[in-house]
Image (cartoon, helix red, strand yellow):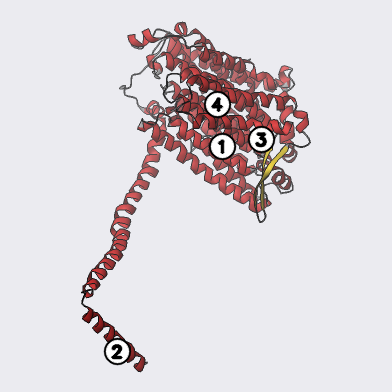
């Protein structure tokens, strides 16, 4: 019975995609409003059944559905893996995904592509479910590529706008760069272990020495894939541009699905990474640099969705920092809480944009808390959670990562705390500019202001509740908790924990000191933002204002896009034009056309012997016979 339930979890979203995709021109919106979210709800219910009957999967977590690829020594079954890690991801993907689908019913109500939108969304969830349920790397890779395709379709959903198409192409191409690393890593895994199934690969890996060059190579290649999918330096620039898609797409991509794929993949492959300390160091440094880099950019952004986009990049950096420090449970804990509060913040931003008639610049907002009370209070919960203020969820998950970092490296901990302070500042800057003081928009926008319908605000309330209490799943011993999530995920990370040297634990007094330092800094940043943007109201600068120095650098996002354009895009375009205009047109085309012209000339010349005179033909025939006899005599 459980095998059928496991099989049906990804089948329902796939059915939803097929129904809506094949009949998107004729299916009424009301039916789409049921089929789109309903299929995700069914998957969520089945996931809950699996979760509450998890004891049935402890002895045989791998479920073989059918033989798939069998060529010589390569034998890859189509199989699903149901263990604590995949169940946690299933709950996040289907639970948060369902809430986002419900919200989308109200947000996309007037859009002519309503049915097409839900078809893409269902396909997106199906691909993500394949990614997290796959029992081997090829099935994970199918889901990996599937979410990449769906992100292209959804980012460029309003395809009549060429800028949106460019953003979709940018996301697709940059993800392909990372995916090449993933693919090469898979080839090296098969060459090394003779299999690509998780159970066989990880069982063999346990006997390999720590620091083995081949394992380091495998983990670095897989990490390249994670860098592209999870938007880490240097492959992060696609994610802010992904804001071109509808706001529910931003919530789905940035909260519960695509960008978390890299974190999940590394956590799933934890045994390999524990065997490669050099790779772990690379992951930690990359994540820390990304967290600080993106947070500093977010401070001076004015587009409400761009702020949240850079916030996502920064929070993903924290997850990678946790992975690099060996805090696999902490990274997955933060992934879960981040799914709650970041989905809440994006959907809250969508509610604001909906009320403002499409306006996204926070400098043109203000005073919205009285006009949009439900949106304000839920957005406030999300902001407090991401800032890491107790007792909301973000505090517990971020504190766990910071504690492991302190055990790992005091310097890395100090840098990570600085990133946490910046997070508190830019998020409360957003909150104060959007919801406090007086309204700064146009009279038409003021007249248009209204709270979103219940189909949009109810998901906000659900996510606000999850963002508030989500930290309870892993309350540490310091707060008299039982660390349930750590115990739940322990079997997945047990082999890696047995290999790695555990860090020296800190005392409870040191933990309290670390929490006090971080919390005091965050509260100071919140007050500083309040003083600057509410009391003084001097943080607003119109687009024409001249900026200089660091402010200009951060406002321009370090001009990384311009740098990539100068160093990569323009040289490649120049090379393309050279190959087209010089090599292809002037050499290859002339060579090919020349061969054709010779054939034409030869045909035109030889056809003159086709005179139609029978006597001439007989003369040529006799002449040919004489020549043949003559050459035979000579030979």
- Across and down, in percent, residue 61 comes to 73, 36
Kindly state the secondary structure of the residue where label 2 is placed: helix
Q: CA distance from mark 3 to mark 4?
A: 23 Å
Q: Residue at x 75, y 26 (%)?
A: 53
The first of marks 3 and 4 along the sequence is 4
Q: CA distance from mark 3 to mark 2?
A: 92 Å
Kindly state the secondary structure of the residue where label 3 is placed: loop
Q: Are marks 1 and 3 in contact (CB under 8 Å)?
A: no
Q: CA distance from mark 2 to mark 4?
A: 88 Å
Q: Is residue 364 above or below residue 27?
A: above
- Across and down, in percent, residue 117 comes to 47, 27
Q: Neighbour class for label 4 at 10 Å: few (<14), some, many (≥20)?
A: many
Q: Is residue 184 above or below residue 229?
A: below
- Residue annotated with mark 3: 326
Task: Name the front one of labels 2 and 1.
Answer: 2
The image quadrant where one finds the C terminus is bottom left
- Across and down, in percent, residue 82 comes to 70, 34
Comparing 113 with 518, the one in front is 113
Q: Which numbered dot is residue 626?
A: 2
Q: Are marks 2 and 1 in contact (CB under 8 Å)?
A: no
Task: Name the front one of labels 3 and 2.
Answer: 2
Comparing 485 with 211, the one in front is 485
Q: Is residue 26 visible?
A: yes
Q: Residue at x 65, y 35 (%)?
A: 133
Comparing 378 with 610, the one in front is 610
Q: CA distance from mark 2 to mark 1?
A: 87 Å
Task: Name the front one of labels 1 and 3.
Answer: 3
- Residue annotated with mark 4: 255
The first of marks 2 and 4 along the sequence is 4
Q: Which numbered dot is residue 285?
A: 1
């Amino acid at each position: 019975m459980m095998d059928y339930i496991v099989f049906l979890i990804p089948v329902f979203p796939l059915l939803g995609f097929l129904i809506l995709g094949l009949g998107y021109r004729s299916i009424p919106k009301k039916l789409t409003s049921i089929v789109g979210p309903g299929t995700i709800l069914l998957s969520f219910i089945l996931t809950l059944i699996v979760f509450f009957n998890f004891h049935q999967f402890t002895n045989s977590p791998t479920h073989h559905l059918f033989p798939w690829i069998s060529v010589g020594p390569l034998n890859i079954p189509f199989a699903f893996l149901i263990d604590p890690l995949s169940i946690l991801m299933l709950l996040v993907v289907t639970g948060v995904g369902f809430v986002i689908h419900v919200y989308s019913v109200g947000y996309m109500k007037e859009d002519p592509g309503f049915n097409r939108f839900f078809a893409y969304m269902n396909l997106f969830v199906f691909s993500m479910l394949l990614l997290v349920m796959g029992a081997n790397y090829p099935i994970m890779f199918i889901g990996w590529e599937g979410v990449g395709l769906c992100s292209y379709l959804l980012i460029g959903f309003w395809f009549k706008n060429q800028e949106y198409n460019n953003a979709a192409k940018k996301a697709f191409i940059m993800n392909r760069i990372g995916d090449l690393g993933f693919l090469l890593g898979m080839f090296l895994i098969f060459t090394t272990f003779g299999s690509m199934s998780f159970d066989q690969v990880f069982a063999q890996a346990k006997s390999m020495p720590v620091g083995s060059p081949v394992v380091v190579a495998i983990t670095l290649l897989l990490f390249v894939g994670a860098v592209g999918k999870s938007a880490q330096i240097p492959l992060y620039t696609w994610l802010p541009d992904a804001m071109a898609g509808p706001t529910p797409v931003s919530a789905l991509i940035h909260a519960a699905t695509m960008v978390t794929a890299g974190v999940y993949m590394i956590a799933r492959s934890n045994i390999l990474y524990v065997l490669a300390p050099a790779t772990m160091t690379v992951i930690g440094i990359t994540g820390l640099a990304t967290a600080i880099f993106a947070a500093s950019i977010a401070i001076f952004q004015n587009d409400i969705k761009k702020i949240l986009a850079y916030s996502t990049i920064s929070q993903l950096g924290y997850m990678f920092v946790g992975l690099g420090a060996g805090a696999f449970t902490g990274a997955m804990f933060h992934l879960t809480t981040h799914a709650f509060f970041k989905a809440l913040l994006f959907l809250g931003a969508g509610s604001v944009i909906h009320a403002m008639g499409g306006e996204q610049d926070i400098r043109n907002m203000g005073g919205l808390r009285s006009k949009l009370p439900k949106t304000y209070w839920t957005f406030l919960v999300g902001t407090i959670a991401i800032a890491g203020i107790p007792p909301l969820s973000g505090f517990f998950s971020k504190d766990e990562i910071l504690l492991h970092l302190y055990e790992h490296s005091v310097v890395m901990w100090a840098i990570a705390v600085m990133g946490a302070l910046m997070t508190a500042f830019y998020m409360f800057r957003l909150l104060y500019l959007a919801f406090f003081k007086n309204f700064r928009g146009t009279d038409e926008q003021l007249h248009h202001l209204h709270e979103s319908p219940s189909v949009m605000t109810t998901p906000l309330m659900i996510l606000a509740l999850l963002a508030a209490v989500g930290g309870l799943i892993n309350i540490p011993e310091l707060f008299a908790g039982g660390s349930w999530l750590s115990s739940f995920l322990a079997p997945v990370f047990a082999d890696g924990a047995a290999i790695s040297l555990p860090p020296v634990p800190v005392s409870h007094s040191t933990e309290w000191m670390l929490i006090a330092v971080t919390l005091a800094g965050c509260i100071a940043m919140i007050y500083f933002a309040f003083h600057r943007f509410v009391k003084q109201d001097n943080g607003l600068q119109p687009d024409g204002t001249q900026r200089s120095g660091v402010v200009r650098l951060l406002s321009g996002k370090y001009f990384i896009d311009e740098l990539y354009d100068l160093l990569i895009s323009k040289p490649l375009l120049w090379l393309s034009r050279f190959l087209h205009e010089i090599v292809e047109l002037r050499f290859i085309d002339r060579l090919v056309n020349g061969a054709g012209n010779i054939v034409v000339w030869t045909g035109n010349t030889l056809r003159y012997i086709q005179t139609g005179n029978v006597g001439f033909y007989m003369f040529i025939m006799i002449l040919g016979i004489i020549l043949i006899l003559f050459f035979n005599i000579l030979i």
